[in-house]
Image (tube, grey):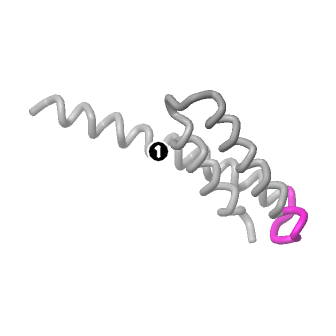
Amino acid sequence: AFPSLHVASMMCTTWYCTQQKPRWFTSLIYLWMLAIVYSTVVLRLHYLVDIAGGLIVGWIAIAASGKKLHLAEQKGKAH
């Protein structure tokens, strides 16, 4: 189904798990993400267009959560 939430959720997981982590850990998590993306196509769970849609949904989720986090931090400093 469009979009691939396998890809979107893995993209969000990868983004937040790799913030300020060692290079070896970041590389491992990105390889894991690529393996999941690859397996969704090879196992015929999704088409390439579904992968692209999942990447877009993941990017939107990361952007939206970053804005909410920033607003929450500003609100917390106001008190």
Q: Quadrant of the N terminus?
A: bottom right
Indicate yes or no whether the magenta region holds residue 60.
no
Identified at 63% across, 35% down, the residue is 26
Q: Residues within 10 Å of mark 1 (few under 14, many from 20)?
A: few
Q: Quadrant of the C terminus?
A: top left
Residue 32 screen position, x and y as percent = 72, 49
Identified at 86% across, 56% down, the residue is 48
- Amino acid tagged 1: Ala
> Furthest-left residue in view?
79
Instruction: Report the side of 19 relative to 50 (left or right).
Output: left
Say if 9 sits above or below 69 in the image. Answer: below
Residue 42 screen position, x and y as percent = 90, 64
Write down the region rendered in magenta. Answer: 41-48
Instruction: Report the side of 32 relative to 10 (left or right).
Output: right
Identified at 66% across, 44% down, the residue is 29
The count of marks equals 1
Indicate yes or no whether the magenta region holds residue 43.
yes
| Residue 37 position by quadrant | bottom right
Local SS, label 1: helix
| Residue 5 position by quadrant | bottom right
Residue 17 screen position, x and y as percent = 53, 43
Say if 37 sits above or below 23 in the image. Answer: below
Instruction: Report the side of 30 relative to 64 (left or right).
Output: right
Residue 16 screen position, x and y as percent = 51, 42
Name the residue tied to disc 1: 64
Decide whether the magenta segment is chiefly helix, strand or loop: loop
Q: Name the foreground residue: 21 vs 45.
A: 21
Say if 70 sits above or below 42 in the image. Answer: above
Identified at 67% across, 48% down, the residue is 56
Say if 6 sits above or below 60 in the image. Answer: below
